[in-house]
Amino acid sequence: MSKQHPRYQAALDKEALTIRNQIDKEVMMTMKLEALNKILLAMLGDARLVDMWWNGQNKAFHYATPKEIYEETPEDVIKYVMEHYQR
């Protein structure tokens, strides 16, 4: 196996780190989504209602769906759900 040029190796390392960070972010988002769905299921009592909640317009999000908001700023949806869960 030949040794890579240091600059080339540095570029490869940087790209690998970028890919890893993206994968880590996607895994965290999936974990958050699964946790939110468990909380929503406990609150709403039916998986169909959870699906309707994610895909229905919500006044709190200026009539956007929670799914749309979650894709842009998941923290907003997490905060909203947790505020209502703790009531």
Image (spheres, helix red, strand yellow):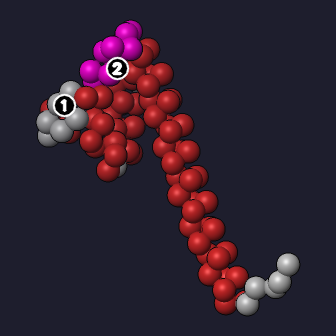
Residue sitting at the far top:
45
Around disc 1, counting alpha carbons within 10 Å, would you say few (fewer than 14), some (14 to 19), or many (20 or more)?
few
Q: Is residue 1 left or right of residue 74?
A: right
Residue 49: name its quadrant: top left
Q: What residue type is labelled 2?
A: Val
Marks 2,1: beta carbons within 8 A: no
> Which residue carries the number 1 mark?
58
* Circle 2 SS class: helix
Which residues are the magenta region? 44-53
Q: What residue type is labelled 1?
A: Asn
Around disc 2, counting alpha carbons within 10 Å, would you say few (fewer than 14), some (14 to 19), or many (20 or more)?
many
Residue at 50% from the left image edge and 39% from the top image edge:
30
Relative depth, front residue between 18 and 82: 18
> Which residue carries the number 2 mark?
50
* Circle 1 SS class: loop
62 w.r.t. 24: above or below:
above
Task: Characterize the magenta stretch by its predominant secondary structure.
Answer: helix
Relative depth, front residue between 84 and 10: 10
Residue 27: name its quadrant: top right
The verdict on residue 47 being magenta is: yes
Residue at 54% from the left image edge and 45% from the top image edge:
28
Q: Specify which label sits upstream in the sequence, 2 or 1.
A: 2
